[in-house]
Amino acid sequence: MQSPALTSHAHLSEAAPVFSPDIEQIIKWRDSSYAADLYIAAVSWLDLFTYLDGRLVTEEELRLHFSLRERPTRTMLRLFQSWGLISNESGWLHATASAVRYLSGNSADSIASYIATMKYKPSVRELYEILRQGGPNTWHVERGVTKSWDALMQTDEFADLNTRGMEERGRIFAPHLAKLLDCTNDTSVLDVGGGSGVYSAHLLMHYSSLSATIFERPPVDQLARTCLTDRNLYPGRAHVIAGDMFVDPLPRDASLHLYSHVLHNWGPDKVHLLLSKSFDSIASGGRIAIYSCHPNDRGGQPAPAAEAEYSVLLTTGYEGCCYSVDDMRTMLESTGFQEIDYHKSICNRSLIVARKIA
Ligand SMILES: C[S@@+](CC[C@H](N)C(=O)[O-])C[C@H]1O[C@@H](n2cnc3c(N)ncnc32)[C@H](O)[C@@H]1O
């Protein structure tokens, strides 16, 4: 028997309008998926807001009190600042009135136990372990087996799945990047960790005199060749170099280096290494472009919630996090880059561009 909805158009048109989520929301449901788990872990396993009730503490004092690691603590505090649960006044942290009222065990209105009923959920426990131990090996590709994303990306099956995912996301984001990133005066772009090459492909379609080199580690280099061949860009205007970006020299002939969704996978030391390698191999006057989610904390303001939420996913599954605009400015300047510009993109992404002057 057919459902009434399929047989009667009249029935359909009388129904209340159906909510139709846009791409921003469709992506946000995935990108923000670990944020609530971190919140439940902090309320239940740490009892964070009872501790903060009536206290002003520094980030370091808070970390020492709970024996927490620096990277996940920073991500947690940024999340709670963006949610209005914690305020940061010149480095002194305190719980906001709402956080104290509803989440401190000292309050008559506390619902902390209600939140804590979820404390044994596996991903909540995992977030608690990451807070305490920092380990990002949370990829459960087989039941009972956890591996690092880095190790998985060197296996054919996972590299294929991940690169397909990045390619699909890139089809949404890359046309926007090609509008934001003016390559009029560039001759060649080096797309470091470029995945399928989708961002380079859109830059090539936008700028007819540009050529691109995708620098990728096997087995993704071969996937890039296939995708660029399908786009009639390889061989020809696109090249692919197989290598390890941390170990192998970067080619020296590109006027622009692009890191799209790459730096946020790594800790500050490795980010610094990549920025330094780029600085050394770009000629004077060349640029670096970093496309990712950069929580916008300029002027000491809390970042927008969706940007802080995505950083929880990066902190959970990788060695890095979403580096904020101020983080990136500090790292780029310490490497030698200047003229740092920030451009907002779609779906909580942004582009940071900097130049090598000398
Ligand atoms: C999150 S994906 C981003 C891919 C693409 N840039 C994008 O925005 O869709 C990160 C990429 O970095 C690559 N990668 C990781 N470690 C690498 C290494 N040591 N050398 C070169 N590429 C690496 C991975 O293979 C992966 O394609």
Image (cartoon, rainbow, N blue to C red):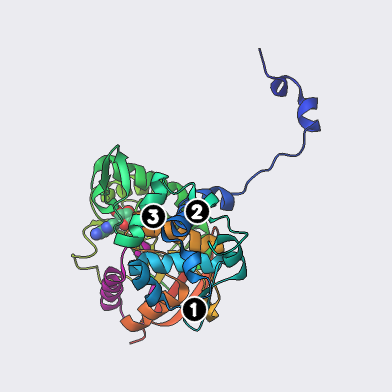
Ligand 1's image quarter is: bottom left
Percent from the top left, x then y, of residue 223?
Answer: 31, 46
**Label number found at residue 16:** none
Residue for badge 3: 127
Q: Nearer the viewer, mark 1 or mark 3?
A: 1
Residue for badge 1: 56
Q: Are marks 2 and 1 in contact (CB under 8 Å)?
A: no
**Label number found at residue 36:** 2
Q: Nearer the viewer, mark 2 or mark 1?
A: 1
Question: Which residue occupies the foreground of this view, 75 or 98?
Answer: 98
Q: How far is disc 1 from disc 3 in space, using C-alphas?
A: 24 Å
Res 351 seen here = yes
Percent from the top left, x then y, of residue 106?
Answer: 55, 64
Q: Residues in magenta?
A: 263-288
Determine the image quadrant of residue 358: bottom left
- Prevailing secondary structure of the magenta residues: helix
